Image (spheres, rainbow, N blue to C red):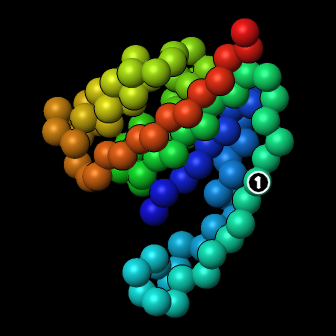
């Protein structure tokens, strides 16, 4: 299951918090849930798999998303997920990051 976290002008929003876990995607019975947000001048959008949020934790994900950018953020999340399970990634690890900084 994927999750989408938006850090928008310093505020965290879990855009997928109302999605249905069951029935699962691929079962032909999954129900889509739309989400949207108005973007500010400075934002980061993080799309992550459950292999990230299960092993890194939401508090750490939010903290790292506020502190780091780009590849440094992704590498930090990956390292934390691997360390949580003895050095190997225990599950799928997928991250897509979009970010915009005010010019």
> x, y (%) of residue 24?
46, 78
Question: Which quarter shows the N terminus?
Answer: bottom left
- In this rendering, the count of numbered labels is 1
* Residue with the most extreme bottom position: 29
* Residue with the most extreme top position: 103
- Whether residue 59 appears in this view of the structure is no
Q: Is residue 16 above or below residue 54?
A: below
In the displayed structure image, the side of residue 14 where residue 82 appears, left or right: left
Residue at the (65%, 24%) spot, across then down:
100
Q: Is residue 28 above or below residue 31?
A: below
- Whether residue 20 appears in this view of the structure is yes
Toward which corner of the image does residue 21 lie, by quadrant? bottom right
Q: Secondary structure at mark 1?
A: loop
Residue at the (40%, 17%) spot, across then down:
72
> x, y (%) of residue 84?
29, 36
Residue at the (16%, 39%) spot, across then down:
88
Residue at the (79%, 22%) spot, across then down:
41
Q: Is residue 60 above or below residue 32?
A: above
> x, y (%) of residue 18?
70, 65
Q: Nearer the viewer, residue 92 or 83?
A: 92
**Disc 1 marks which residue?**
36
Are there few (<14), some (14-19), or many (20+) residues within 10 Å of tag 1? Answer: few
> x, y (%) of residue 92?
28, 52
Question: Which quarter shows the C terminus?
Answer: top right
Toward which corner of the image does residue 50 lie, by quadrant? bottom left
Q: Nearer the viewer, residue 59 or 71?
A: 71
């Amino acid at each position: 299951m994927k999750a989408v976290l938006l850090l928008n002008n310093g505020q965290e929003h879990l855009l997928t918090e109302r999605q249905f876990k069951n029935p699962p995607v691929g079962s032909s019975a999954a129900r889509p849930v739309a989400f949207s947000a108005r973007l500010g001048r400075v934002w980061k959008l993080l799309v992550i798999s459950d292999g990230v949020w299960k092993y890194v934790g939401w508090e750490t994900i939010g903290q790292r998303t506020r502190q780091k950018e780009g590849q440094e953020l992704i590498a930090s999340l990956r390292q934390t997920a691997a360390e949580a399970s003895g050095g190997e990634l225990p599950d799928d690890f997928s991250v897509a990051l979009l970010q915009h900084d005010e010019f």
